[in-house]
Amino acid sequence: MNQLTFIKSRIRKAHGGDLSIGKRRSRRPLNIKKPMHVTLRSEFAYSGRCLLQHRKIINTVVKKASHRFRISVYEKAICGNHIHLLVRGKTRFEIQNFFRVVAGHIAQQILELHPLRFNEKPKLRGGALGVIKKNTCKHPKNQRKFWSALIYSRLLSGWGKEFRTVRRYIEQNTLEALGIIPYQPRKSRYGLIAPIQIRAVPLRI
């Protein structure tokens, strides 16, 4: 029993994002029976490339890709420099292609409108401008990358309390991004203002 508990505790649920910087690529943990919290973040999404200014592009790309790859989107939040998605797919192949198409098409369309300037510095989370880390731009073409790192994904335990918590968290991000409610500093992974009763229904986008 102790050995089984140890094995379960070693199972990875999160992949990408800051966890992928400076590390070898590994297989993304996926489970077609469970929902997944996905985040795309860009340190270049400021000024004309602010994601809030391109909500129509993002909504269109996500809608087309979700229909094409049979992905259920339960909640979505478009913030200034990142996007939250709560999704579930039917196969690993379709989930991976959904990630690839969404990230690629959004970046391509935004950069066509507002290209990166030569040696442009990314805007860090604190608001200051920084320099591109060496381990993320070993080749000159990577300096043109829009997203800061690999797509972050985290498998949820199921459709119960954790699913409802993540969905409320993503909804809160939308309200904060639109200025409907004030921003609340996160004390934990999912800092919530107040509980909201939400049913597990796919979002129509």
Image: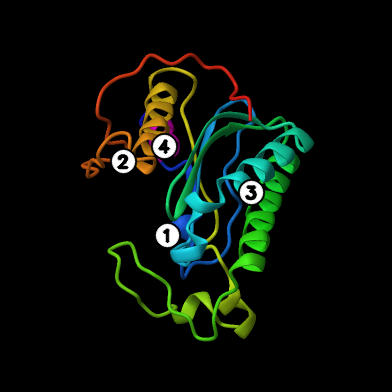
The single residue placed furthest to the right in the displayed view is 68
Q: How is the image coloured?
A: rainbow
Residue topped by disc 3:
57
| In front of the other: 36 or 185 | 185
User: What secondary structure is found at the residue carrying circle 2?
Assistant: loop
- Disc with the residue nearer the chain's start (1 vs 3): 1
Q: CA distance from mark 2 to mark 1?
A: 14 Å
Q: Label 2: few (<14), some or many (≥20) within 10 Å?
A: few
Q: Amino acid at mark 3?
A: Ile
Measured along the vertical axis of the image, is residue 196 above or below residue 109?
Answer: above
Q: CA distance from mark 4 to mark 1?
A: 22 Å
Residue at 61% across, 85% down: 140
- Disc with the residue nearer the chain's start (3 vs 4): 3
Q: Mark on residue 126?
A: none
For the N terminus, the quadrant is top left
User: What secondary structure is found at the residue carrying circle 4?
Assistant: helix
Q: Which residues are magenta?
A: 3-9
Residue topped by disc 4:
174
For the C terminus, the quadrant is top right
Measured along the vertical axis of the image, is residue 140 above or below residue 100?
Answer: below
Q: CA distance from mark 3 to mark 4?
A: 16 Å
- Disc with the residue nearer the chain's start (4 vs 2): 4
Q: Is residue 12 visible?
A: no
Q: CA distance from mark 2 to mark 3?
A: 28 Å
Residue topped by disc 1:
18
Picture coordinates of residue 200 (x, y %)?
52, 17
